[in-house]
Image (cartoon, rainbow, N blue to C red):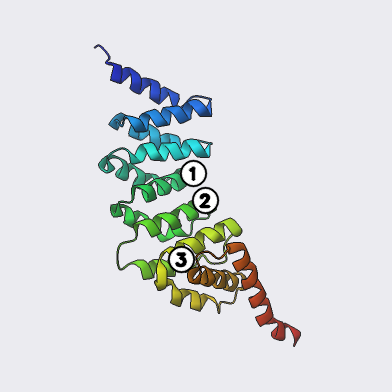
Amino acid sequence: MTMTRQDTDAIRALQGLEDSSSSVRLQAALAVGTAPDPRFVDKLIERCAIEPEFFVRDMLTWALVRHPVSLTLPRLVREVRSGRAQARSQALHTLSKIGDRQAWPAITRALLSDADNEVARSAWRAAVALVPEGQESPLATALATQLGRGERETQLSLSQALVALGEVIVPVLHAATTADDPGVRAHALATQRLLRDANAGFELAIEEAKRIVALARAPQDGQ
């Protein structure tokens, strides 16, 4: 059977995705996205799980978005259950970029509280992108359970996800400001400030919130 030029190009692109050079892999992902082909989908998803370079992963996601949702979405939904953290994280990131709400049931509480911070952050962003109308309040409640988690970058991601939900987060943030954990209270206060002023710097907001929490505790600590 004679191979067409399209077949030859496809084979070259698929081989390029596994090249030792990140620039070659980047160009291969670009080529795959430029000329979508159903034969590429499995390899793209497989590569997302192990690709070490951020820019290449981003191009892999772009290439997947260029393919029909009917092909990519079922495979990505399976991938969010992978035992490999990067596979889960990148699949969630790609689902958020595709933006098809059929994927919503795949955004489970387990993913929103995943032990891996990158997976959790991707799940938060995907949840906000895919949440159906009327489900924003339950999502806000689920996200609020993660307040106080991680370092600045993780906390900022959560605050941004919560703020993207809008005014539905007001009650859950208010409740969190009275939590026993001072880290949770500070994170909730910082998120409240971001909700009021989207241009407020998170670093300043969280430091101010910590001072407020510390001052509130001072009389009790001095007794």
Foreground tag (3 vs 1)? 3
Disc 1 secondary structure class: helix
Q: Earlier in the sequence, mark 3 or mark 1?
A: 1
Q: Is residue 66 above or below residue 177?
A: above
Q: Badge 2, how many Cα within 10 Å: few under 14, some, many 20+?
A: some
Q: In the rendering, at what x and y percent does residue 206 appear?
A: 61, 67
Foreground tag (3 vs 2)? 3
Tell me the tag on residue 128.
none
Disc 2 from disc 1: Cα separation: 8 Å
Question: Looking at numbered disc 1 in the image, what kind of residue is underneath it?
Answer: Gln
Q: In the rendered image, which residue does mark 2 sit on?
A: 118
Q: Which image quadrant for residue 124?
A: bottom left
Q: Badge 1, how many Cα within 10 Å: few under 14, some, many 20+?
A: many
Q: Residue at x 39, y 44 (%)?
A: 79
Residue 2 visible, this orientation: yes
Q: Seen in the image, is 177 located left or right of residue 71?
A: right
**Which one is nearer the viewer's eye here, 120 or 208?**
208
Q: In the rendering, at what x and y percent does residue 182 appear?
A: 62, 73
Q: Is residue 17 above or below residue 90?
A: above
**Which one is nearer the viewer's eye here, 152 or 71?**
152
**Which one is nearer the viewer's eye here, 158 or 180?**
158
Q: Earlier in the sequence, mark 3 or mark 2?
A: 2
Q: Residue at x 60, y 59 (%)?
A: 152
Is the C-beta separation of discs 3 and 1 under 8 Å?
no
Tell me the tag on residue 86.
1
Disc 2 secondary structure class: helix
Q: Residue at x 55, y 77 (%)?
A: 177
Quarter of the image where the C terminus is located: bottom right
Question: Looking at numbered disc 3 in the image, what kind of residue is underneath it?
Answer: Val
Q: In the rendered image, which residue does mark 3 sit on?
A: 163
Residue lying at the far top in this picture: please name it.
2
**Which one is nearer the viewer's eye here, 9 or 39?**
9
